[in-house]
Amino acid sequence: MTNFLITGGAGNIGSALATQLAKTESYNITIVDNLSTGHVNKIPKAANVSFINADVNIYNDIHPVFERFDFDYVFHFAAVVGVKRTLEHPIGVLEDIEGIKNVLALSKDSNVKRVFFSSSSEVYGEPFEIPQNENTTPLNSRLPYAIVKNVGEAFFRSYEKEYGLPYTIFRFFNTYGPHQSLDFVVPKFLKAALAGKPIEIHGDGLQTRSFCYIDDTIATCIETLHEDYKNSVLNVGNDREMTVLELAKEIIQVTGSQSEIIHLPALTEGDMRRRCPDVTKMKAILHRELTTLHEGLLQMVDFYKSQSKS
Ligand SMILES: NC(=O)c1ccc[n+]([C@@H]2O[C@H](COP(=O)([O-])OP(=O)(O)OC[C@H]3O[C@@H](n4cnc5c(N)ncnc54)[C@H](O)[C@@H]3O)[C@@H](O)[C@H]2O)c1
C-alpha cells in the first residue's frame, strides 16, 4: 500500500485529488481538514479514503495523525483562501506558517518520500512580465497570503537543503471546478448567469486572469509523483489570458443567459492587473492540450444542473 496525506482534502482541489487517487486500490488516502471552507460532502466516499477533522496549524492536532499512519506522500493544501477572506483575516493567514512548519517537521521525522505544497500565482504579485515564468519572473509578494506562500516555498526548499526532504511546489493559478466555493469568480458568475441575476464585476473588468479546469490541475499533480519532478517548482494553470469582462461574456454565452453585467467599485487591494502563467513545463508533463474554458464551463453547468435535479 502507498499512504497519502492530503491536508485541506475537504476543499476544492484537495477533494478532487483524493477522488482521483482513490481510483487506485493500492493507495490509502487520509484527509485532514478543519472544515473552515471545506465540506465533508466533497470528500469521496471510498473504502480507501478516511477523514480526520483536525487543524494543521495546531501541532497537538496534527502530530497524532503522523504517529498513526506511515505516510509516503504528503500534499499540504490546507490554507486560508480567497481574496476577501485573506484580506479580512490577515493574522489568521499568517498563522498558516505554523501549519507549513508542522507538516514539514513531521514529514521529515517520519521519512516521508516527498511533500507537495500548494503555493499560488499570488507569489508573483503585480507581475513584472507576462507570461509569468517559474525561474525568471521576479516574485513581488506583498499581501499576507502571498507572503505566506513565498515563505512556505522557502521552508520547503530549506528542508530539502538541510534534511534532504524532497518537495514539489505547485504555483496554482485560478483553478475552477464543480466543487469550488461560490465566492470564487467562475462559480459566482455561473450561478448568477444560470439564475438570470446580474453578474457583478469589481472595477472596469479589464484586469486579466487565466482559468485552469480542475481536471488539468489534478492530472498534473498526479503526474508529478514521478521522480523527475522532485525538488521542482511548477506553474499549474492555463495560458489563455482573458479579461474578467470577457469571462463574464463567455459565461453568458455558454449558459444562454439574459443576465446583465454590472460594475461595482474596484477593490482597493488584492486585485492584480494581469495574471497568466508560462505553462511550458506543465504541458510537457501532461503531454496533451489543456481543457478549454468553453469545455470546462459546460462541465460545470452539467454538474450544477444534475445537482439541482437531485
Ligand atoms: N483554487 C485556486 O485557484 C488556487 C489558486 C492558488 C492557490 N491555491 C491553493 O490551493 C490550496 C487549495 O485551495 P482550494 O481552492 O481547494 O481552496 P478550499 O478552500 O476549497 O480548500 C482549502 C481547504 O483547507 C481547509 N483548511 C484551511 N485551513 C486549515 C487548517 N488550518 N487545518 C486544516 N484544514 C484547513 C479548508 O477547510 C478547505 O477544505 C490552498 O492552499 C490554496 O491557497 C488555490
Image (tube, grey):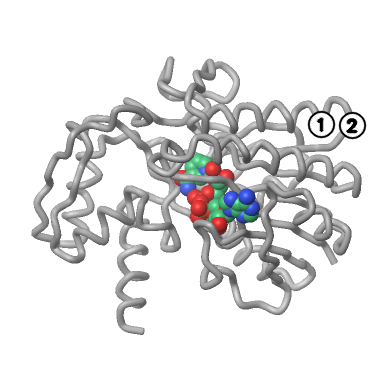
Q: Residue at x 75, y 46 (%)?
A: 226
Which numbered marker is on residue 298?
none
Label 1 is placed on what type of residue? Tyr
Contact between labelled residues 1 and 2, with CB atoms less than 8 Å apart: yes
Q: Quadrant of the N terminus?
A: bottom right
Q: Quadrant of the C terminus?
A: bottom left
Dot 2 beta carbon under 8 Å from ligand 1: no
Compared with 295, 51 (above or below) is below
Residue 190 in the figure: left or right of residue 58:
left
Mark 2 falls on what kind of element? helix
Is disc 2 surrounded by few (<14), some (14 to 19) or many (20+) residues within 10 Å? Answer: few
Q: CA distance from mark 2 to mark 1?
A: 5 Å
The part of the image, by quadrant, that contains residue 232 is top right
Dot 1 beta carbon under 8 Å from ligand 1: no
Q: Residue at x 61, y 39 (%)?
A: 170
Residue 185 in the figure: left or right of residue 111:
left
Mark 1 falls on what kind of element? helix
The residue at which mark 1 appears reads as 159
Label 2 is placed on what type of residue? Tyr
- Where's residue 64, x and y in %? 83, 59
- Where's residue 264, x and y in %? 17, 39
Residue 265 in the figure: left or right of residue 7:
left
Q: Residue at x 67, y 47 (%)?
A: 76
- Where's residue 89, x and y in %? 47, 40
Q: Residue at x 37, y 56 (%)?
A: 296
The part of the image, by quadrant, that contains residue 162 is top right
- Where's residue 120, x and y in %? 53, 36
The residue at which mark 2 appears reads as 163
Camera-side residue: 187 or 96?
A: 96
Is disc 1 surrounded by few (<14), some (14 to 19) or many (20+) residues within 10 Å? Answer: some
Residue 261 visible in this rendered orientation of the protein: yes
